Amino acid sequence: MTIITDRVDSDGIITIDSAKCSGCGTCVAVCKDLSLKLADGKVTINQEPIFGCIACGHCAAVCPNNAIMVEGRTLSSRDFIQIPSKEEKTSYRELYSLVLARRSVRDFQDREVDPDIIDKILQLSVTAPMGIPPSSVEVMILHGKTRVREFSFDFIDYLKKYRWIISPTIIRLLRPFIGKDNYDAFRTFVIPMMDFFVQRKVMEENWLLYDAPLAMYFYGVFTDPADPYIAATYAMLAAESLGLGS
């Protein structure tokens, strides 16, 4: 039974080079779909998996003899990279320092971000883990203060247009359905925040994205709800490592 996403409707294809396979079973251990099994000292395809290969590539990544290749579901041999050695990996102290150094920035320099830096941020973002591959996370890039401001003001106009949907009267009517916590959040935070954005736009002030020189919006319609947030987090850490505030 294939796990279908908005991008694929078929299983991954596993190819095993029996001549290279040592029968260590490492690939079998990491495959949580039970797509692989050991038989007569060699790894073979299990004809009765749980769902079907999702082309996560873990089996190929851990094989010490490069005896497995996985393709399909947008995955190809070009996507496999050499995993860094232990010596090349970032230490806990270095990672901890990077995370501590990142702060939420609201005042930005009036200069554009180099396109090469944007590419590096995206290169790291695509390594973010996902619920079920292939990832359906998309990213909208607003490069330059002008584009960021245009998007911000368009979005604020959109909020203003539909402000009536969360008027105090309607929110009170919805309270039995949304619960006290959500009701309080709308009443004390969401509604005042929207009104503040609209008021500041009249004064030509962008309090939504603060006229940042670069904005990246990660989203996904048919994806695990957490996937865009994880990719965005990777992007923020990449930006910090490249000398940008986020």
Image (cartoon, rainbow, N blue to C red):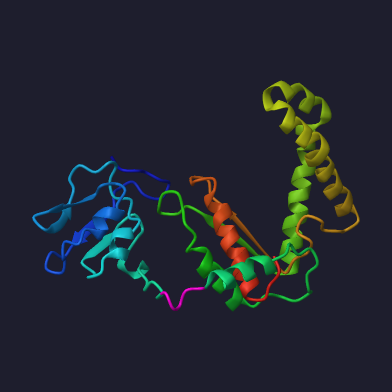
Q: Residue furthest front?
A: 93
Instruction: Give 121 or 234, whichever is nearer the viewer.
Output: 234
Q: Residue at x 40, y 45 (%)?
A: 5
Is residue 171 at all visible to an observer of this figure?
A: yes
Q: Residue at x 75, y 76 (%)?
A: 111
Asked which quadrant contains residue 72, the reply is bottom left
Dominant SS of magenta comes to loop
Instruction: Give 93 or 168, whichever is nearer the viewer.
Output: 93
Asked which quadrant contains residue 192, the reply is top right
76 to 120, vertically: above or below? above
Q: Residue at x 64, y 78 (%)?
A: 114
Residue 240 percent across, percent down from the top left: 65, 70
Q: Residue furthest right?
A: 203
Q: In the image, is 161 to the left or to the right of 51? A: right
Q: Is residue 87 magenta?
A: yes
Residue 189 percent across, percent down from the top left: 80, 41
Q: Is residue 14 magenta?
A: no
The N terminus, quarter of image: top left
Residue 144 percent across, percent down from the top left: 71, 69
Span highlighted in magenta in the image = 86-90
Asked which quadrant contains residue 183, the reply is top right
Q: In the image, is 220 to the left or to the right of 71? A: right
Q: Residue at x 27, y 60 (%)?
A: 70
Residue 84 percent across, percent down from the top left: 41, 74
